[in-house]
C-alpha cells in the first residue's frame, strides 16, 4: 500500500560509514531483502527507514512524502526485531493490543482484531500467556502478529528467523512470505542468509560495507552477478581470469583464459583490454568425454564428496587452479583420475576483476 | 531444584556462616535486647527497675495529646515526601545513566555518587552555608537582587531538613533504579515506538513497570534511612523539627529513660516495617507478569 523511495541514504557513526549513498525504490506490495555479510549496514538501513537512526544525509520518502523528520511513531511502520522485543510484563493479547491502544481503537475492535491476528499466526489459544511461557517459534509469531495487527504501511523485519532452529527457520520463510502475499504489505527484510532472501524476496539488495553492489530479482542476482563479491557471497563460484577478445553477438563474448580460449555469455560493457573474471557456478560445470569441444578444460580429480543426490568434486587444472564442479552421484572416477570439465556458454557470466 | 545443586548449597551456607555470626552478634542480639528493654520497669535512679510492664507502650500510644503518635506520623510523612522527591528526581537521572553512551555519563555518575563521598556533618554545613536565614547564599543573593526584604526561611524547618535528606539519600534511589534499567532491553522502547507510542509513553509503558524492582529497592532504602535519620534533622532542623529518632536519643541520653526510649524505637520500627510491607504488596501487583 506504500512505495518507499530511498535516495543517496548515508549514515556515518563516528568513524564508520555504515551506509554509503544507498539508492533504492521499493514498490507497492513488494518484498525486498537487504542481504549481506554481518556489519555491512543492513540493520542501519532498516533503522533509518524506521526512524530509529537519523541519516547523515539523503532522503527517505513514503508514497512521495519525505519522512526523515518524522519520529518512528509517526511513520506507521510494523517492526519485527531479531530478539522479538516482546513486552515481558504483558500477555500476548496485551502485546498485540498495545499498538491499537496507541491508535485509539475502541476496545471491542481491539478485541476483534487481536483475536484475528492471533488466528492468522496460529496462536488462537495463547492470548492469555506471557511471552516467557512461549517457545521461540511462538514468540516469533507473536512478534509478527504484533507488527501486522496495526495494519502498518510498511513491514520491517530484522533477521527475524536468526534465533530459530534450522527446521523451523525453513518453515517460517514460507509462512512469512505467504502472509506478506496475503496481506499485500510492502516489506523490507534484513538477513545474512541467502537462502532466506532467495525464497522470500521479489528483489534482493546485496550490500557490502555500506554499498549496494546489486539490486535485482533472485535469479538475476544469482545468474548475472554485478560484482565479484556478489558472485562469491551468493552461492558458490569458480573464478577464472579472462580477457575479452571479441564480442560475438550482443549476449556472447570470446575470451582468452589460462584454461584456453572460451566462449561466455555477457551482455555488459566490454571496453578493449578490460580484465574480467569468468564466473563458473559448480553446477554449470559437467564432466564430459569430449576433450576437444568448446569450453572444456582438463584437470585431475583431487577431492570427491558423496552428498547422496550428487557428487561434489574438485579438479586441479593444468595451471594449478582448483575448480569446483557437481557430478552425478554415479560417476565412477577415483581421486587422481584425469577428467575433462565442460560448461555451456549460456551458464556463465563475467564480473570485473 | 535438582539434587546436583545440594552440595553447592551446603557450601554456600558454610561460606555465609561468618557473616551470619556477625549479624547475630551485632544486629540481632542488640535488637532483642532493645525489645526486652522496652518492657522493663522505668527507674529514676537506675537504668531500669526490676520487673516487666507494658506501661512504656501505654505511655507512647496512649498519650493524652497524642504527642508521640503525632511525631510518629510526621516522621513517616517526612519519609514519604523524601522518598517521593528522590523518586521523581532520581528516575530520570537513573534512566539517563543507564541509557546514555556519552562520555559525560561517567562524570554524571561521579556527581551522583558525590554525596556519599563526604561525611554527613560536612555536607550539612555545606547546606547551612547555602540555606542559612541571614547570611545564607540564597537569601543574601535574593536580598542583593532586591527581590526580598528580610529572608525566606529555608533552614530550621521542614524545608531545610527535606532538602538535606533528599541530597544525601538520592544516590540510594538512583543506583538500584539504574541497575534495573540497565537490564531492560532498549529494543522494548523501540518496539513500543514502532507501535505508535511517543518517547515518554514508551518509557512509561515499558521501562517504568519493568524497573519496579529497582524502584522498590531504592524507595525502601530512602524511606528507612529517612525515618531513622538523626544528624541531618538536628543540624538543619534545629528545635523546630522533632522526629522519632530525636525523641529516642533524648530519652536515652538526656532523660536516661532507657525503657521508654526503647519502646519509642520499637514502635517506629514496627510502623516502618508495616509501611514497607504495604508498599511491597501494592507495587508487586505491577510486575505480576515478570515475576512469580
Ligand atoms: N550505534 C552505532 N554506533 C557506532 N557504530 C555502529 C552503530 N550501529 C552500527 N554501527 C556500525 O555500522 C556498521 C553497520 O552495522 P549494521 O547496520 O548493524 O550491520 P548489519 O546489520 O549489516 O550486520 C558496523 O560496522 C557497525 O559496527
Ligand atoms: Mg544487523
Image (cartoon, coloured by chain):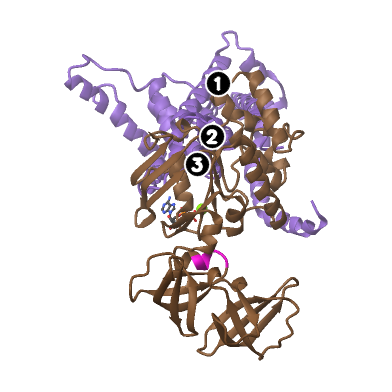
Query: Residue most toward the front?
Result: A249
Q: CA distance from mark 1 to mark 2?
A: 15 Å
How many numbered dots are placed on residues in this image? 3
Q: Residues within 10 Å of mark 3 (few under 14, many from 20)?
A: many
Residue B41 shows up from this direction: no
* A82 lies above or below B155: below
The C terminus of chain B lies in quadrant: top right
**Left or right of A314 on screen, residue B96:** left
Q: What element does badge 3 sit on?
A: helix
Mark 3 → mark 2, Cα distance in angstroms: 21 Å
Reply yes or no: does residue B48 show up in magenta. no
Q: Residue at x 55, y 21 (%)?
A: A104
Magenta range is: A231-235
Mark 1 belongs to chain:
A
Q: Which mark is residue A104?
A: 1
Expressed as whole percent of the image width and height from the top left, the position of residue B13 reads 72, 54
Viewer-nearest of discs 1 and 2: 1
Mark 3 = which residue?
A: B178
Q: Is mark 1 within 8 Å of ligand 1?
A: no
The x, y position of residue B188, in whole percent, is 55, 39
Residue at the (67%, 50%) spot, across then down: B21
> Real-space Cα distance between discs 1 and 3?
32 Å
Identify the main secondary structure in magenta: helix
Chain letter, purple in picture: B
Which residue is under mark 2?
A: B192
Q: Name above or below for residue B63 compared with residue A55.
A: above
Q: Who is closer to the viewer here, B125 or A353? A: A353
Chain coloured brown here: A
Labels 3 and 2 within one chain: yes
Query: Mark 1 vs mark 3: same chain?
Result: no
Q: Residues within 10 Å of mark 2 (few under 14, many from 20)?
A: many
- A1 left or right, relative to B6: left
Amino acid at each position: 500500500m506504500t512505495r518507499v523511495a530511498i535516495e543517496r541514504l548515508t549514515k556515518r557513526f563516528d568513524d564508520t560509514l555504515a551506509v554509503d549513498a544507498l539508492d533504492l525504490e521499493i514498490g507497492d506490495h513488494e518484498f525486498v531483502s537487504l542481504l549481506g555479510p554481518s556489519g555491512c549496514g543492513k540493520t542501519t538501513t532498516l533503522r533509518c527507514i524506521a526512524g530509529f537512526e537519523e541519516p547523515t544525509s539523503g532522503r527517505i520518502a513514503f508514497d512521495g512524502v519525505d519522512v526523515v523528520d518524522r519520529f518512528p511513531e509517526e511513520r506507521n511502520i510494523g517492526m519485527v526485531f531479531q530478539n522479538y522485543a516482546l513486552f515481558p510484563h504483558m500477555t500476548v493479547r496485551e502485546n498485540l493490543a498495545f499498538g491499537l491502544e496507541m491508535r485509539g481503537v475502541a476496545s471491542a475492535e481491539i478485541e476483534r482484531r487481536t483475536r484475528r491476528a492471533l488466528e492468522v499466526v496460529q496462536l488462537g489459544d495463547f492470548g492469555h500467556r506471557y511471552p516467557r511461557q512461549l517457545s521461540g517459534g511462538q514468540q516469533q509469531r507473536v512478534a509478527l502478529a504484533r507488527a501486522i495487527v496495526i495494519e502498518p504501511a510498511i513491514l520491517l523485519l530484522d533477521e527475524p528467523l536468526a534465533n530459530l532452529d534450522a527446521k523451523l527457520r525453513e518453515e517460517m520463510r514460507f509462512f512469512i512470505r505467504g502472509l506478506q502475499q496475503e496481506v499485500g504489505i510492502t516489506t523490507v527484510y534484513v538477513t545474512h542468509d541467502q537462502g532466506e532472501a532467495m525464497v522470500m524476496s521479489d528483489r534482493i539488495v546485496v550490500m557490502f560495507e555500506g554499498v549496494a553492489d546489486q539490486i535485482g530479482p533472485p535469479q538475476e542476482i544469482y545468474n548475472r552477478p554485478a560484482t565479484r563479491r556478489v558472485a562469491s557471497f551468493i552461492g558458490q563460484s569458480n573464478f577464472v581470469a579472462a580477457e575479452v577478445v571479441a564480442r560475438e553477438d550482443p549476449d556472447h563474448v570470446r575470451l582468452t583464459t589460462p584454461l584456453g580460449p572460451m566462449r561466455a555469455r555477457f551482455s555488459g560493457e566490454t571496453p578493449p583490454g578490460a580484465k574480467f573474471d569468468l564466473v563458473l557456478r559448480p553446477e554449470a560445470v559437467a564432466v564430459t568425454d569430449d576433450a576437444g569441444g568448446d569450453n572444456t578444460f582438463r584437470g585431475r580429480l583431487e577431492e570427491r564428496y558423496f552428498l547422496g543426490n550428487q557428487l561434489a568434486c574438485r579438479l586441479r587444472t593444468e595451471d594449478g587452479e582448483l575448480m569446483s564442479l557437481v557430478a552425478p552421484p554415479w560417476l565412477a572416477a577415483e581421486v587422481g583420475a584425469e577428467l575433462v570439465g565442460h560448461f555451456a556458454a549460456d551458464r556463465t557470466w563475467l564480473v570485473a576483476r | 531444584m535438582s539434587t546436583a545443586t545440594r552440595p553447592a548449597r551446603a557450601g554456600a551456607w558454610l561460606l555465609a556462616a561468618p557473616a551470619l555470626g556477625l549479624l547475630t552478634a551485632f544486629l540481632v542480639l542488640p535488637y532483642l535486647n532493645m525489645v526486652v528493654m522496652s518492657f522493663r520497669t522505668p527507674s529514676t535512679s537506675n537504668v531500669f527497675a526490676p520487673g516487666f510492664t507494658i506501661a512504656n507502650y501505654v505511655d507512647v500510644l496512649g498519650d493524652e495529646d497524642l504527642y508521640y503518635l503525632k511525631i510518629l506520623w510526621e516522621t513517616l510523612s517526612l519519609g514519604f515526601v523524601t522518598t517521593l522527591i528522590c523518586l521523581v528526581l532520581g528516575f530520570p537521572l537513573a534512566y539517563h545513566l543507564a541509557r546514555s553512551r556519552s562520555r559525560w555519563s561517567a562524570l554524571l555518575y561521579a556527581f551522583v555518587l558525590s554525596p556519599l563521598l563526604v561525611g554527613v556533618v560536612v555536607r550539612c554545613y555545606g547546606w547551612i552555608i547555602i540555606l542559612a536565614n541571614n547570611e545564607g547564599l540564597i537569601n543574601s543573593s535574593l536580598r542583593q537582587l532586591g527581590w526580598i526584604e528580610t529572608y525566606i526561611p529555608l533552614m530550621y524547618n521542614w524545608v531545610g531538613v527535606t532538602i538535606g535528606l533528599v541530597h544525601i539519600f538520592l544516590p540510594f534511589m538512583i543506583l538500584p533504579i539504574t541497575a534495573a534499567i540497565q537490564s531492560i532491553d532498549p529494543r522494548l522502547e523501540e518496539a513500543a515506538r514502532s507501535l505508535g507510542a511517543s518517547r515518554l509513553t514508551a518509557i512509561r509503558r515499558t521501562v517504568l513497570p519493568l524497573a519496579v524492582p529497582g524502584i522498590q529497592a531504592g524507595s525502601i532504602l530512602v524511606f528507612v534511612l529517612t525515618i531513622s535519620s538523626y544528624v541531618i534533622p538536628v543540624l538543619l532542623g534545629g528545635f523546630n523539627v522533632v522526629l522519632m529518632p530525636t525523641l529516642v536519643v533524648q530519652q536515652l541520653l538526656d532523660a536516661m529513660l532507657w525503657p521508654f526510649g526503647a519502646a519509642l524505637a520499637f514502635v517506629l520500627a514496627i510502623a516502618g516495617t508495616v509501611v514497607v510491607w504495604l508498599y511491597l504488596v501494592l507495587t508487586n501487583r505491577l510486575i505480576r507478569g515478570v515475576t512469580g
